[in-house]
């Protein structure tokens, strides 16, 4: 009975209903799209009926997920209009949806101007859905985002900021990872964002990895797999589509696929042992989508095509051997890794031939869209092949309720669900379990009650998803709240001699110096800053706010802590650890090699001190 509810909807009914809701979506307005008429549609029969009502262009459009500029779907500011015209050939998101029959869009913070505040995001979602329901065949949009948390965050405070993957790896709790995913997913769903390109399933076995690093849960495939599965369960229990990425594994590369085509040199046995387990765990947990990687894996495909374009890797291995039946989505198609061998008109066609379903972020949506349509008309791709992917995508939309309820959201629901006091308190508790104490000479930490005068210096990274806020002021405020008297100097990642001299002079009369570091390399001026401060004889406490590997480049510090990111939650947690309000409980999820002899391990995975040690 339920399967027939959608099939009864004629094209005329769909059009009439779309017209009725086209003006909906203002604050507090709830409208039911045409696809919700009757009972919720379940099963494929009704979805196939819907596909049968689509033009070829509408089917092809369902495969694309693109970015756009502006805080509004139909009324962005002039600079965003200009950017949209230049890059998309349209003025706004609504026109992009209409022109290309888009099945989805993706939100970014910062450069696209999509995210300003929570109510604005809700209004943007409603505008996107109004445009989607105004299409000739109205189908709600599947709105997506990269909200991995930690260093890769798109929606900042007042949404709840959860620890990122490597921090959760340090916490070693599948329960915490699941809870973090469920809270994050519920907040995204309240904003009408139902596809999150997380969690990262890459196993970070290369400390020099420039693109994954703290986005990974760690270096142990089994532990990573357990945490990936837990996050998948958390997101999907909240009604949000999770996406394990980047298949077949991006954890052992020294190149960034945004700018190059990396090569993974693992043997087939190494791939099975290192890279495959987290993806197998995600599939066993019921993950709805998996994202491809733009890299070569000769042991899997000797053609050396990028994995995104490889039928062997996506169809034979991912679908055949691993048994994945969900949606395969490309990593962003504007990345150089997928563009080195083929032109932008060939990449989307080859990706579909390889087995991809969703085409994410093409560099030129008009070229990509027209290329796929032309490939079908020429016979290179069959319409049946397009429909296969459309069906998988519609199943996702059906699963999250877009085809059986209103796609619109309200400010009231956002206020009730996002950044609640309970969620924020839970985030703090989880984060406190991730802070890792690597060095604690002579029980330097926790600081004693008489050690109240602190200098906080060092790197000052901007907050993820909030370009107006920086790490040092947040850490300083957190320490002040705990009764310390602090002075801070932002010396940055590359302090010059005068800046270092000023920091050393400011250390005079302080009980301790807290030095924030951010990716310290062998030639980094941050090393000079730390060594000069150590030479003063004042206790130096290092706080590595990104990769935990900084300590390998630093000598003489009395204490060293790793936070894996620098959001408010991490900085509050590390301040509480310094003050002795909480015990450091994190354990390294990756080994740290010696800087002078990388073949030797300075701290093994699992290392982490407590105040009882």
Image (tube, rainbow, N blue to C red):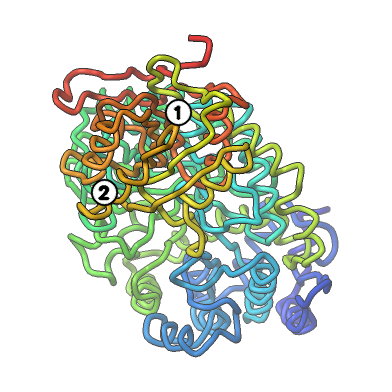
Question: What residue is drawn where x is 48% and y is 55%?
Answer: 463
Q: Nearer the viewer, residue 255 or 431?
A: 431
**Element at label 1:** helix
Image side of residue 560 versus residue 93, left or right = left
Residues at marks 2 and 1 touching, judged by CB atoms closer than 8 Å: no
In the image, residue 423 sits, relative to residue 381, either above or below, namely above
Question: What residue is drawn where x is 34% and y is 31%?
Answer: 275
**Element at label 2:** helix
Image side of residue 254 versus residue 397, left or right = left
Label ID, residue 500: 2
The residue wearing badge 1 is: 224
Question: What residue is drawn where x is 56% and y is 57%?
Answer: 393
In the image, residue 207 sits, relative to residue 93, either above or below, namely above
Question: What residue is drawn where x is 35% and y is 39%?
Answer: 213
Q: Nearer the viewer, residue 305 or 26?
A: 26
Question: Which quadrant holds residue 369?
Answer: bottom left
- Residue 87 in view in this figure: yes
């Amino acid at each position: 009975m339920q399967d027939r509810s959608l099939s009864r909807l004629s094209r005329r009914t769909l059009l009439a209903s779309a017209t009725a809701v086209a003006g909906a979506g203002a604050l507090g307005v709830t409208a039911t799209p045409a696809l919700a008429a009757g009972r919720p549609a379940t099963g494929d029969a009704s979805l196939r009926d819907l596909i049968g009502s689509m033009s070829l262009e509408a089917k092809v459009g369902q495969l694309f997920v693109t970015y756009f500029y502006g805080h509004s779907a139909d009324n962005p500011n002039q600079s965003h209009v200009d950017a949209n015209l230049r890059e998309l050939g349209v003025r706004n998101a609504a026109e992009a949806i209409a022109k290309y029959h888009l099945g989805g869009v993706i939100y970014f913070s910062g450069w696209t101007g999509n995210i300003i505040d929570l109510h604005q995001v809700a209004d943007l979602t409603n505008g996107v859905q109004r445009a989607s329901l105004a299409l000739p065949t109205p189908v709600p949009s599947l709105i997506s985002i990269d909200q991995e948390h930690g260093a890769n965050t798109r929606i900042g405070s007042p949404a709840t900021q959860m620890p990122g993957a490597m921090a959760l790896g340090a916490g070693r709790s599948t329960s915490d990872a699941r809870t973090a995913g469920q809270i994050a997913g519920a907040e995204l769903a309240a904003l009408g964002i139902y596809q999150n390109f997380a969690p990262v399933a890459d196993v970070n076995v290369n400390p020099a990895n420039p693109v994954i690093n703290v986005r990974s849960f760690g270096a142990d495939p089994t532990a990573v797999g357990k945490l990936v599965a837990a996050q998948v369960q958390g997101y999907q229990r909240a009604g949000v589509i999770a996406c394990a990425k980047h298949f077949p594994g991006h954890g052992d590369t020294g190149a960034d696929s945004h700018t190059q085509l990396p090569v993974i040199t693992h043997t087939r046995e190494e791939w099975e042992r290192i890279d495959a387990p987290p993806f197998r765990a995600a599939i066993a947990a019921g993950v709805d989508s998996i994202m491809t990687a733009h890299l070569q894996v000769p042991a899997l495909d000797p053609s050396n095509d990028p994995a995104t374009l490889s039928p062997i890797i996506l169809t034979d291995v991912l679908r055949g051997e691993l048994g994945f039946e969900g949606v395969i989505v490309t990593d962003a198609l504007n990345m150089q890794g997928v563009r080195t061998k083929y032109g932008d008109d060939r990449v989307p066609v080859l990706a579909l031939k390889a087995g991809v379903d969703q085409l994410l972020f093409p560099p030129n949506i008009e070229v990509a869209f027209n290329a796929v349509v032309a490939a079908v008309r020429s016979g290179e791709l069959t319409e049946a092949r397009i429909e296969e992917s459309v069906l998988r995508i519609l199943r996702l939309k059906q699963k999250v309720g877009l085809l059986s309820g209103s796609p619109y959201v309200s400010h009231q629901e956002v206020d009730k669900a996002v950044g609640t006091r309970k969620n924020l308190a839970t985030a703090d508790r989880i984060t406190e379990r991730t802070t890792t104490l690597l060095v604690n000479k002579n029980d330097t930490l926790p600081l004693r009650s008489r050690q109240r005068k602190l200098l906080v210096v060092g790197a000052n990274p901007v907050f993820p998803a909030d370009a107006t806020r920086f790490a040092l002021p947040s850490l300083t405020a957190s320490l002040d709240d705990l009764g310390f008297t602090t002075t801070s100097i932002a010396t940055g990642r590359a302090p010059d001699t005068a800046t270092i001299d000023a920091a050393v002079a400011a250390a005079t009369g302080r009980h301790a110096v807290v030095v924030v570091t951010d990716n310290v390399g062998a030639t980094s001026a941050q090393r000079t800053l730390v060594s000069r401060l150590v030479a003063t004889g004042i206790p130096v406490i290092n706080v590595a706010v990104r990769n935990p590997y900084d300590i390998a480049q630093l000598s003489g510090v009395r204490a060293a802590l790793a936070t894996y990111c620098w959001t408010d939650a991490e900085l509050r947690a590390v301040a509480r650890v310094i003050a002795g309000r909480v015990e450091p409980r994190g354990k390294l999820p990756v080994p740290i090699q010696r800087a002078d002899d990388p073949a030797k391990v300075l701290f093994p995975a699992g290392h982490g001190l407590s105040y009882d040690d």
